[in-house]
Image (cartoon, rainbow, N blue to C red):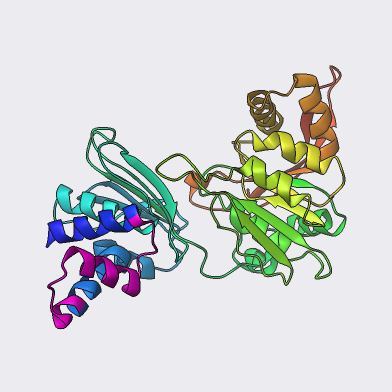
Amino acid sequence: MLNVLEQIQAACIEAKVEPNAESISQIVRSLYPATPHSDLVELVDEVLSSIFGLGPLEELLFLPNLTDILVNRFDDVWIDRGSGLEKTEVTFSSEAAAQEFAKRIATRGHRRLDDAQPFVDIQTDSGLRFHAMLPPISSAGVTISIRTPQRHSLSLEDMIANGNLDFVTYQAICEVVDEHKSFIVSGGTGSGKTTLLAAMLARVPNTERIVVIEDSSELSISHPHVVGIQARLSNSEGAGGITMTDLVRQSLRMRPDRIVVGEVRGREISDLLLALNTGHKGSATTIHADSAISVPTRIEALGLLAGLPREAIHAQMYSAFDVVIQMRNARNGMRGVAELAKFIRASDGTVITQSLLTASTA
C-alpha cells in the first residue's frame, strides 16, 4: 500500500492538482484502470486520510493553548502551550513512518520532499504552518515543526485578565492605536508578538481599512475591514513566487489606511520604510529582537541587506515608526508586554530607542 500512496502523491504533484476526492479518483483511475468501484472508493478514502490526517500528532491538536508541535526525531515529540516546551509521550512507529508522514503533508502543498529537495515549508488549508527537513540534513532523523493557528482572537482586555498586561501598559497601548502611531512589536519566537498585534489591530476604528501582508497567514484580527495578502513560494520549477517585497509594493495600490506586515525579516524592510514615509500612519509590523534597544540595529541590518545606505535607513526609520512594544522573553514561562520605548535621534544622527515605561508584570 505504501508504494501505491507514493505513486498517487507523486501524480498529484506532477499534475499540480488539489488533492481532493475528485482529483484523486481520476488519478487512481489513470494509474489503475481495472480497479473495481468499491475498491476505488476505499482507496480514495485511504489516500485522503493519509494526505490530510496528522497521524499520531492528531491528538495533540486538541490540547488547549497549543501553539507548536516539534518533532526532533520519530520518537521525540515536544509541544508548546504557552509556558515553555513540554515533552510528550507521542511517537511515530519508526523513522520511515515519520518521513512518510512528512512527505504526505508536503504533497498537500504541491511540494516535493525527497533527497533532491530535503526540506519544505508550507501552510495547509487548515492554517497549520508546516516545516520538515530530511536526513542527512537533519542528522538525528526527520525534523518537523508545526505552528498551529490561533483558535480565537484575544482582545487587549483578555490580556489584562490573563495577566499579560497591567492597566497602565494597557492604557499606553490603546493610546498608540488611537493616536495613529506606527509601531513595532518586538520579541523572540513564541513571545506572543502576533497575539498582541492582532489584539491591537482589533481596536482600530471600523471605518479604517487594514491591509495585512504575511508570508504565511497567522494574524486573526477581529475587525470588519481586513484585507489579507500572502506571499507564495516558487514551485518546484522555480517559477510563480510572490515575495513580501512584491506585496508591500502592491499594498500601496489597495487604498490602505494602515499597512501591517506580519513579520519583517528581509528586503521588504526597504519598501515598508518607503511606504510608511508616504503616509499610512498607524501601521505596524513585528520583528525578532531580544530588547527594545536592539530594534534599530536589527532594522539597520535588514536595510543594509536590502542595499540601503546606513544614513537613509536611520532617516526613514525615524520618520516611519514611533513606538517599540517589547515582549517578555518566552523562556521565562510567562508571555506579555515588558516595555514600551520610543524612537529618538542620537547625537551622531542615528536612531536609538528610549524607554517610555516598563510593565509592572515584567
Q: Is residue 91 visible?
A: no
User: Is residue 64 placed above or below 232 in the rendered structure?
Assistant: below
**Residue 264 drawn at (x, y percent):** 63, 41
Q: Quadrant of the N terminus?
A: bottom left
Please identify the quarter of the rendering in which residue 66 is found. bottom left
User: Is residue 200 placed above or below 96 in the rendered structure?
Assistant: below
Residue at (21, 53) in percent of width and height:
100
Left/right of residue 209 with respect to residue 153 in the rendered view = right
Residue at (72, 49) in percent of width and height:
250
**Residue 253 drawn at (x, y percent):** 78, 52
Residue range (magenta): 15-40
**Residue 301 drawn at (x, y percent):** 64, 25
The verdict on residue 23 being magenta is yes
- Of the pair 239 and 246, the residue shown nearer to us: 239
Left/right of residue 14 with respect to residue 43 in the rendered view = right
The verdict on residue 258 being magenta is no
Residue at (65, 40) in percent of width and height:
245
Residue at (64, 36) in percent of width and height:
291
**Residue 154 drawn at (x, y percent):** 61, 67
Q: Which residue lies furthest to the bottom in this view?
A: 38
Q: Can residue 111 be seen in this view?
A: yes
- Of the pair 85 and 272, the residue shown nearer to us: 272
Q: Which residue lies furthest to the top in this view?
A: 348
Prevailing secondary structure class for the magenta stretch in the rendered image = helix
